[in-house]
Amino acid sequence: MSKDICELCSSPEELRDYEVAPKSESIVICSTCASSIHEPNRNLTHWHCLSESMWSSEPAVQVMAYRILTMLGSQDQLDMMYMEPEVEAWAKQGIKDKNVELVRDSNGTILEEGDSVSVIKDLVVKGAGFTAKQGTTVKNIQMVQDDPTHIQGRVNGTKIFILTKFLKKL
């Protein structure tokens, strides 16, 4: 690990530590890398440096190079990269799938795992023998795999599926 230059672009300017989640390992990056690391398309020319840093012997540097090259869609460089299987798995853990459709409530607000929502109209819960009344709060919701129109949550102690068009994020 280098403390006197950026481990991605080799710049000596305005260095800081950057944690490479989900592990608690960090790399040293410059302010230029830090400003566009999550949106690398904002500074395409800067990221040409990855053609060298992707060969680093440091797993955390390899992970960040892989993630940034993936966000840039640089498949040619990704095809050249070699990482140990556990390092590649770590790299893939930090990449959000762009093809995943976002789950939205009735107002278009994005819902995430663990959010609390409110039911916006009375809903008869089939097979459970009760009605989820308007204004009922559903806490700690869970996403339904491969279906952005439903969530799972507990109402009256029963875990049920609810259409997101009948919900409002709190």
Image (cartoon, helix red, strand yellow):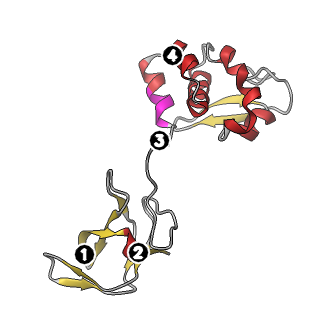
Mark 1 residue crowding within 10 angstroms, few (<14) / some (14–19) / many (20+): few
By secondary structure, the bulk of the magenta-drawn segment is best described as helix
- Quarter location, residue 14: top right
Which x, y percent locates residue 127? 13, 75
Q: Which residue is mark 1?
A: 157
- Using the image, determine if residue 126 lies above or below residue 24: below
Closer to the chain start, of discs 1 and 4, is: 4
Q: Secondary structure at mark 2?
A: strand
Residue 130: give x, y in percent of width and height.
19, 84
Q: Amino acid at mark 4?
A: Asp
Identify the element where label 4 is drawn: helix
Magenta segment boundaries in residue numbering: 89-93
Q: Earlier in the sequence, mark 3 or mark 2?
A: 3
Residue that badge 3 annotates = 97
- Residue on which the image places disc 2: 167
When asked about the image quadrant of residue 164, the answer is: bottom left
Is 19 displayed left or right of 91 in the figure?
right
3D distance between C-alphas at marks 1 and 2: 18 Å
Tag 3 near tag 4, CB within 8 Å: no
Q: Amino acid at mark 2?
A: Leu
Residue 112 as seen in the image, left or right of residue 66: left
Q: Provide the residue designation for mark 4.
A: 79
Q: Residue at x 42, y 19 (%)?
A: 85
